[in-house]
Every structure is written in structure tokens, then in C-alpha cells.
């Protein structure tokens, strides 16, 4: 059987590659297509969220969402549920939050969203959100 | 051969002008809602201008116009101005500020919101008639649960059966309806239509986000009250009693697509005029709609509405054809509308509509041929440069539209629709055609 990597690579390099691969696998945002994610955003999110900085709609602006503390956009009136939960919107947290009904992920939230059950769409969306800064 | 006389058929021209104003120019835009929600016009309307609704716009309406961005109280006022150049096929062209609208629209509380339109319509010779347009005041209870499923309950007080419908395909909500010498009660283009001349209340429910049900009743306004509200007494719908309205629909929002199928009914007993014998009238219709929304780059919207009306006349009219006999006690009418639109980048659009009105024959009611059938088409292209998230102005818009309205059948005939005698040039359906260019500004 032909191995998928050259056998003469040093063991340390192989280990580094394995670790990097594992990390990438745990970051869903990196796996998606941001261009396709923009289309997902337009059909799933854009009615309630703008991407422009400081522009809040029914939901807060998603400018700089990745890495942001939950409930932290100035001028937006959050639910107590989201204000007090103390999340940071890492790609993993966003993946968890958006893959299920919002009211299940964060009971008491104002957000009305049933969740995105298409894994590729979700990965693409997270990749697009990561570009909003 | 004597020429076609505009003066002789001025009444028909007035009716056609009214129809044109109903179907082609009645753009509805309420930037007050955009200011209230923080949304762009394009979130609720495919072409960033009403009256057609996206599924998001339907939810806003179902929630009683109360959704908000939580950024404090906004002034619930919007204005719309419409300038129109109309070029009828066989009548003088005209250019005027055809309509000025004032909307009081928005939320009062978390559970109470509404829509009130006061319009000033150009009536010629630099005069305007001010009247109360559509009215829809709501109380809504949101985010309820029944059997573990979402439930929304609401009450609507409104003045046009069907205007309050969330899917907005019924004639009183789409403002697209066939015209002719007769029509159903649910058609705003019918002679003596109840539209805006009644007041009623309905109770509605949306269950599990897909099942919509509504029931209610209406009563006609007194002729004097209609007059005070800006409506000519000639269009009085008569005295309506025992009036019931129902609506049942399945509506499925799949984000990139939307589909709905619905039934609608209106039953009433009508005296027209008020001292006349009572007619029993029952409307029963169905409607189908589909929207392809995708990523909002290319949007296709299609709808079909078919409303059948059964009439049991209180008085049998003498037959003008067979002296000494009476016409049948029963009659019917049917209105059908098929509409297809395409919108590019929520700014450029084209809409094609086929409108058909038919009815049972009656020599006494529909002279000269006893046939009320009429068929017409409406073609519109438009451009709305603003009202999107990425446009310069997000909460207001301008709509430039070119509309061609054409009749292909009237009084059941494809030519000589008024039965001109030999040697006299008759009126053809095409003589009612009209082309118009309009600019509507909403802010």
C-alpha cells in the first residue's frame, strides 16, 4: 500500500503536521469557503444582522464577531441571557451556537433562529464571519 | 365612419383610470418600519419597495408591526409621493403628482402596532381628494407555545378583507386584481367593492411557523361615513350583514425558497342599494405562491389567485331579451390573477401579470352582450436604487417604474365592446390600453 506521505520525513515533522492538522480540524471556520459563506449569510442571517460596524438591526452588528465577547456591542440591547453568559465568540462557540436552535443554546435569548443543520453551510458561514473585521 | 368618442365613454375611462391606479401605481413603502427595526427596505420587499413581501416581511406583519431594533422609540411616520406620466392609447396624455401618502405606521407597545394610510389622490384640474386608505391595527401575543410548538396569536382591526393577510397575494394586499363590469367581493377592482368602505376585526393564529388560520367579521360603513372618509357614494358596497371572513394557509419558509397554499372565504348578505332586496354572496378562493430567494441576487416570485363568487340575488330582473320572463335567481363571478416577477440584486425588476374576470351571463346586468368577461395584462419594469444594506440610503427609496396595461377582452368581446351599430366605429379592448411612467419617493 502506498502511504499518503513520504516515509523519509523526520518523525518530528510528521508529529508537527499531525498536531497542526488536529488543530485545524477543531477550527470549523478554517474549513469553509468564505465566498460561499457570504451567500449563506445573505439567506440565513442578513435580515436581522448587518456586517457594517456599528449598524444594529433586530440583532447586533456582526462586524468583528469572531473573537468578540458575547453581549458586548455598544448600543445594542441584549437579553439578560446573552449578556450574562460570558461567552467569547470563538469559531467553536459560534459553531455550537449556530448548529442548534438559539433558544436551546442560550435559553432566554432574543434571537429567533432554528439553527443551521447543513455542516458545509455552517463551515462556510463561519469562514465568512471570520472575514468581518 | 364616425371616430371613437372619448367623451361618450368617459365613464369607462374613469373606471379604467381607477383600475390603473389600483393595479399599477399603488406602490407601498413605509420607511418608518425600517427605522423601527433597523432593517433595510430590501429585507421585507424583494425589490426594496412594497407591497410584495418576503418571508421576513410576512413575519413582521404577523408580529403586528411591533418588531424593533431596541434602539428607543422611533417616530412612526412615513411619506410617499408619486409622480406619474400616463399615456392612454386613445385619450390625452397627462403628467401629475398623482398621489401623496402619509403613513402612521409602527409599534405602540411590544404587543400593539399598526398601519394607517391617509392618501391625497389627484382628481384632475390641480385638485386632490384626501381619503383614509388602508387601516390595520393589531394586538399580538408572540412567542407562545402549544404542544411544544411555536404559536402566535393576534387580532387585526382593518378595513379591507385580505389586506391583513401575511402572504399578501390576495387582491386587497397585492393591489393586483382584474377589472371589468363585475367581480368578486374580495377584489378591490370590482364595482362597489367593500375595500376601504368596511370595518372589521379578525383573529389569527400562526402555529408551528407554517399553519395560518384566521376568522373574523366585517360591517359596511354608512354612506355618509364613507363620504367623510373621502369615498364617493357611488361606490358604496351596500349594506352588508352576517359577514364572515376566513383564511387558512400553509406557508413554508425554507430561507432560500418559500411556498404557500391557501384558502380564503367571505360570506355576506348585501342590500345594494340599502333599500334593495337582499343578495346572498359567498366568495371562496384559493391561492398558491412560490418565491426563490437564494442569496437575494436573483429573486423569482410567482403567485396564482382564483376566487369564485356565488350569488343568490334577492331580486330577479326582467329579461330584456325575452319579455315577460325573469332572469335566473343565481349568478356567479370568478377572478383570476397570475403574476410572475424577477428581481435582480433587489434593484432591477420586471413583473408580468395576467388578470381575468369572468361571470355568469345576464342580459339585464351586463349590457349589451350579457357577458361580463374581461381579460387584461399588466407589464412593469422598475428600478429601485436604494433601500438595501449596502446602498447609500437604507431606510428610504425611490422607485422608477414603467407600466403597460392592456385589455384584450371586455364585455366578453375582443372588439366593439359596446356594440356600436354598423357604420359607427366601435371601441376595442385595446382602446383602454395605457402606458405609464412613474416615480415614487418614500422617506
Image (cartoon, coloured by chain):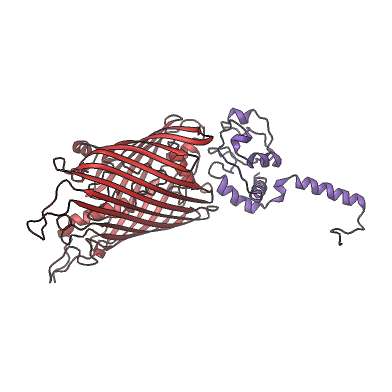
**Which chain is the one coloured purple?**
A
Q: What residue appears at the point 44 percent right and 30 percent down from the top-left corner?
A: B111
The location of residue B47, given as percent across then percent down, is 45, 51
Q: Is residue B33 left or right of residue A53?
A: left
The location of residue B439, given as percent across then percent down, is 37, 52
The location of residue B76, given as percent across then percent down, is 41, 35
Report whether residue B395 is seen.
no
Which one is nearer the viewer's eye here, B14 or A75?
B14
* Residue B224 found in image quarter: top left
Q: Is residue B128 above or below residue B335?
A: above
* Residue B222 found in image quarter: top left
Report whether residue B140 is seen.
yes
- For the view shown, which residue lies furthest in the left direction? B324
**Which chain is the one coloured red?**
B
Which quadrant is the N terminus of chain B positioned in?
Answer: bottom left
Q: Is residue A1 left or right of residue B372?
A: right
Which one is nearer the viewer's eye here, B352 or B211?
B211
**Count of marks overlaid on the render:** 0
Q: Is residue B403 left or right of residue B233?
A: right
Which one is nearer the viewer's eye here, A113 or B3?
A113
Q: What residue appears at the point 80 percent right and 46 percent down from the top-left corner?
A: A22
The location of residue B228, given as percent across then percent down, is 22, 37
Q: What residue appears at the point 56 percent right and 33 percent down from the top-left corner?
A: A110
Which quadrant is the C terminus of chain B positioned in?
Answer: top left
Q: What residue appears at the point 27 percent right and 46 percent down from the top-left corner?
A: B282
Amino acid at each position: 500500500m502506498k502511504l499518503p506521505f513520504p516515509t523519509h520525513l523526520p518523525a518530528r515533522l510528521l508529529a508537527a503536521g499531525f498536531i497542526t492538522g488536529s488543530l485545524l480540524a477543531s477550527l470549523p471556520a478554517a474549513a469553509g469557503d468564505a465566498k460561499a459563506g457570504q451567500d449563506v449569510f445573505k439567506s440565513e442571517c442578513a435580515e436581522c444582522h448587518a456586517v457594517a460596524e456599528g449598524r444594529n438591526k433586530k440583532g447586533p452588528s456582526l462586524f468583528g464577531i469572531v473573537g468578540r465577547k458575547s453581549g458586548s456591542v455598544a448600543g445594542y440591547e441584549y437579553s439578560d441571557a446573552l449578556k450574562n453568559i460570558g461567552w467569547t465568540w470563538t469559531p467553536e462557540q459560534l459553531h455550537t451556537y449556530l448548529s442548534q436552535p438559539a433558544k436551546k443554546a442560550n435559553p432566554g435569548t432574543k434571537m429567533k433562529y432554528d439553527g443551521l443543520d447543513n455542516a458545509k453551510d455552517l463551515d462556510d458561514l463561519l469562514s465568512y464571519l471570520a472575514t468581518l473585521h | 365612419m364616425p371616430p371613437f368618442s372619448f367623451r361618450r365613454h368617459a365613464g369607462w375611462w374613469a373606471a379604467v383610470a381607477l383600475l390603473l391606479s389600483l393595479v399599477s401605481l399603488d406602490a407601498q413603502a413605509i420607511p418608518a418600519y425600517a427605522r423601527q427595526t433597523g432593517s433595510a427596505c430590501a429585507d421585507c420587499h424583494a425589490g426594496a419597495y412594497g407591497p410584495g413581501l418576503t418571508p421576513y416581511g410576512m413575519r413582521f406583519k404577523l408580529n403586528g408591526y411591533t418588531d424593533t431594533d431596541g434602539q428607543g422609540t422611533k417616530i412612526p411616520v412615513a411619506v410617499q409621493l408619486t409622480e406619474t406620466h400616463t399615456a392612454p392609447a386613445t385619450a390625452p396624455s397627462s403628467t401629475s403628482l398623482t398621489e401623496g401618502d402619509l403613513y402612521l405606521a409602527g409599534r405602540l407597545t411590544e404587543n400593539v402596532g399598526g398601519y394607517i394610510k391617509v392618501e391625497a389622490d389627484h382628481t384632475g384640474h390641480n385638485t386632490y381628494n384626501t381619503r383614509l386608505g388602508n387601516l390595520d391595527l393589531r394586538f399580538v401575543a408572540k412567542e407562545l407555545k402549544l404542544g411544544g410548538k411555536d404559536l402566535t396569536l393576534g387580532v387585526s382591526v382593518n378595513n379591507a378583507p385580505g389586506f391583513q393577510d401575511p402572504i399578501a397575494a390576495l387582491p386587497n394586499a397585492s393591489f393586483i386584481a382584474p377589472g371589468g363590469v363585475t367581480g368578486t367581493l374580495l377584489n378591490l377592482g370590482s364595482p362597489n367593492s367593500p375595500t376601504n368602505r368596511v370595518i372589521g376585526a379578525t383573529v389569527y393564529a400562526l402555529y408551528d411557523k407554517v399553519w395560518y388560520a384566521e376568522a373574523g367579521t366585517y360591517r359596511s360603513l354608512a354612506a355618509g361615513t364613507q363620504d367623510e372618509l373621502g369615498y364617493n357614494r357611488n361606490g358604496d358596497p351596500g349594506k352588508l350583514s352576517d359577514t364572515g371572513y376566513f383564511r387558512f394557509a400553509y406557508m413554508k419558509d425554507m430561507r432560500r425558497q418559500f411556498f404557500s397554499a391557501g384558502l380564503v372565504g367571505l360570506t355576506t348578505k348585501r342590500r345594494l342599494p340599502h333599500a334593495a332586496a337582499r343578495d346572498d354572496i359567498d366568495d371562496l378562493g384559493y391561492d398558491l405562491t412560490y418565491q426563490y430567494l437564494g442569496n437575494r441576487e436573483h429573486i423569482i416570485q410567482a403567485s396564482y389567485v382564483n376566487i369564485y363568487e356565488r350569488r343568490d340575488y334577492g331580486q330577479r330582473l326582467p329579461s330584456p331579451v325575452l319579455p315577460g320572463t325573469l332572469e335566473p335567481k343565481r349568478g356567479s363571478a370568478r377572478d383570476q390573477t397570475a403574476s410572475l416577477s424577477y428581481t435582480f440584486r433587489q434593484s432591477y425588476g420586471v413583473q408580468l401579470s395576467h388578470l381575468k374576470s369572468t361571470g355568469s351571463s345576464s342580459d339585464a346586468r351586463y349590457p349589451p352582450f350579457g357577458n361580463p368577461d374581461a381579460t387584461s395584462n399588466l407589464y412593469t419594469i422598475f428600478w429601485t436604487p436604494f433601500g438595501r444594506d449596502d446602498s447609500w440610503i437604507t431606510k428610504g427609496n425611490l422607485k422608477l417604474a414603467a407600466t403597460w396595461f392592456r385589455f384584450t377582452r371586455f364585455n366578453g368581446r375582443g372588439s366593439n365592446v359596446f356594440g356600436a351599430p354598423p357604420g359607427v366605429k366601435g371601441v376595442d379592448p385595446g382602446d383602454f390600453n395605457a402606458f405609464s411612467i412613474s416615480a415614487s419617493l418614500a422617506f
